[in-house]
Image (cartoon, rainbow, N blue to C red):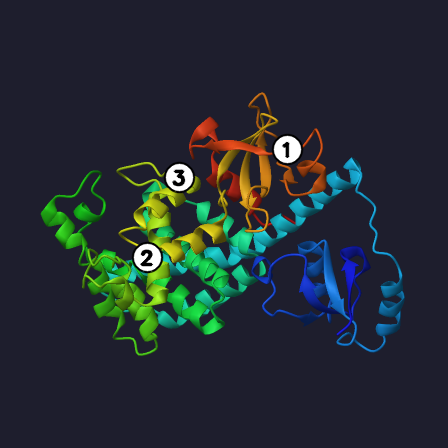
Amino acid sequence: MERIKIYKEQLQLGMYVQELDRPWLESPFLFQGFMLDSNEILQQTRETCEFVYISVEESSTDIRPHLKVLATQPVTRRTPSPEATNSSDEKERENFLAALRRSRKTYDKTRNYIDTALEDVRLGHSVDTRQAKALVASLTENIVRNPNAVVWLTHLKNRDEYTAVHCINVCILAISFGRCLKLNKVELNELGLGALLHDLGKMKIPLEILNKPGRLTAEEFDIMRQHPVLGYNMLQQHDDLPQATLNIIKHHHERKNGQGYPDKLLEYNTPLLTQITAIVDVYDAITSDRCYHDGVSPYDALNDIYRWAKSDFDIKLVEEFIKCLGIYPIGSLVYLNTNEVAVVISASDKTRLRPIVMLIQDRDRKFYKTRRLMNLAHPQWSTGPKAVKIQGVIPPSGHDIDVRRIIEEDSKPIQM
């Protein structure tokens, strides 16, 4: 089957994309191969890839003569000037902010839902699982299209609202991880639903234990360990929840060595979707500020989870999780060899050491008024004497940078 390499500027409606310039899982596209049959798909492809491979035979008949001409021409491309690169960075920022604002709408709807659900459980009322299903389906669609923007929203954290935000974050991260593992849409929705509802049982735990600003006693911890069963017993009464979802709710604290709870399941008795949620649950918990401790950086959290995998998790699954989030996970504060401070907003396996970052502070530690995006994998920043690279990771509270405030500002809808 004849195919030709086409740069994004040459793409036209009617062309059939057979292969990308990156793994399919690092793209927002659901299918491995698709027709450019709308302006939206065309623009999304241009925003995602520098070049693609087009199948001549599978493209529309009216575009094939043009493709035949392109196939006879040498594949060349002018090296972008610094001005063009700056324009590219600005376009990247505009596209990212647009995706962030779209995703924020779904995030806020989900936040309103989980706030209501937690209060309903506390008051002994039933939970609206139909709405939960609809919201998870919408989140899944957003993550497939804009994974980086949605994961960026998981850093809208507040120490005083831990349980609600934690439920949303585990849902988003679990779906993102499941997508990296090539789970199908049904599995992603079952996974997301279990992750969203996994901690509802905590609302049946006494508040003085749930919000205790210190280490729990053995007796208090025994009470806290009841929350998965409490949530399971309550939600299994809903006949519209899949068993895979209920398994997540009941067993997300199981560990592969049989030392988890409530049933001390061994790894081979714990379903995959539950194991995924268990890893993500720990990751979000240790990166979050709690009433009794400050969260660690995403970078340190991955190192911790990798260490704990020997006793707690499937090591291959943990390695896939690290690969999914990247060496510098989204939300990592980093300092560059230019002495600037930035936050990672896009990570991928293909460019794990050179993610897209948002510049926050200049070399004098003054905050930028306009936070510019820099794709460290772009030739302008990755080669030559002026190449920019990450030098190290900064603690989450370093340099008085409030990531939550940055997200709040960037995700606000534009006032018309």
Residue 204: quadrant of the picture: bottom left
Q: Are there few (<14), some (14-19), or many (20+) residues within 10 Å of tag 2?
A: many
Asked if residue 278 lies left or right of residue 89, the reply is: left
Q: CA distance from mark 2 to mark 3?
A: 18 Å
Q: Secondary structure at mark 3?
A: helix
Q: Say which amino acid is labelled 1.
A: Val
CA neighbours of label 3 inside 10 A, class few (<14), some (14 to 19), many (20+):
some
Which residue is drawn at the image coordinates 25% and 75% (left, top)? 237
Question: Along the polypeptide, which appears first: circle 1 or circle 2?
Answer: 2
Chain-order first, disc 2 or disc 3: 2
Residue 97 screen position, x and y as percent: 61, 48
- Residue under numbered circle 2: 278
Task: Give the residue type at disc 2.
Answer: Ala
Q: Report the front residue among 124 and 285.
A: 285
Q: Which mark, by number, is residue 8?
A: none
Given this view, does label 1 or label 2 mark the residue nearer the observer? 1
